[in-house]
Image (tube, rainbow, N blue to C red):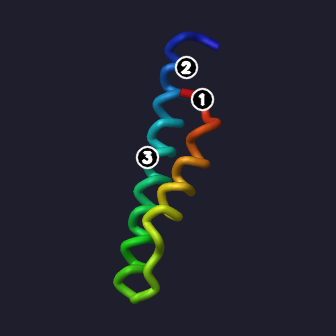
Amino acid sequence: MGLEQQVYDYQKEIDENRKQVREMVMESYRDIARGKGRECSEFFEELEKKYTNDRI
């Protein structure tokens, strides 16, 4: 695999991670709008678990 392909794959992975984070944030906002509410700490713990063991 060439360097260009590695850079492309890495950027694709970063973009997908950003998309997932945005969707999690929007899901929380929708919950708040419905009055379902969600603890901030619960939300951030979920994010932290997702990215703590991921490659940087």
Residue tagged 1:
55
Vertical order, 1 against 13 (above or below): above
Percent x, y of residue 49: 60, 48
Which of marks 3 and 1 precedes in the sequence?
3
Q: CB of mark 3 within 8 Å of CB of mark 2?
A: no
Residue farthest bottom in this picture: 35
Vertical order, 45 against 14 (above or below): below
Q: CB of mark 1 within 8 Å of CB of mark 3?
A: no
Closer to us: 19 or 21: 21
The structure residue drawn at horizontal position 59% and vertical position 48%, both measured from the top left corner, is: 50
Q: CA distance from mark 3 to mark 2?
A: 20 Å
Q: Is disc 2 surrounded by few (<14), some (14 to 19) or many (20+) residues within 10 Å?
A: few
Q: Amino acid at mark 1?
A: Arg
The structure residue drawn at horizontal position 50% and vertical position 44%, both measured from the top left corner, is: 17
Percent x, y of residue 10: 52, 27
Number of residue marks: 3
Q: Amino acid at mark 3?
A: Arg
Percent x, y of residue 55: 60, 29
Residue farthest top in this picture: 2
Percent x, y of residue 45: 54, 55
The numbered dot on residue 18 is 3
Give SS at disc 3. Answer: helix
Front label number (3 vs 2): 3
Quadrant of the image for the N terminus? top right
Is 55 on the left or on the right of 39, as rendered? right
Residue tagged 2:
5
Closer to us: 16 or 3: 16
Give SS at disc 2. Answer: helix
Vertical order, 32 against 13 (above or below): below
Q: CB of mark 1 within 8 Å of CB of mark 2?
A: no
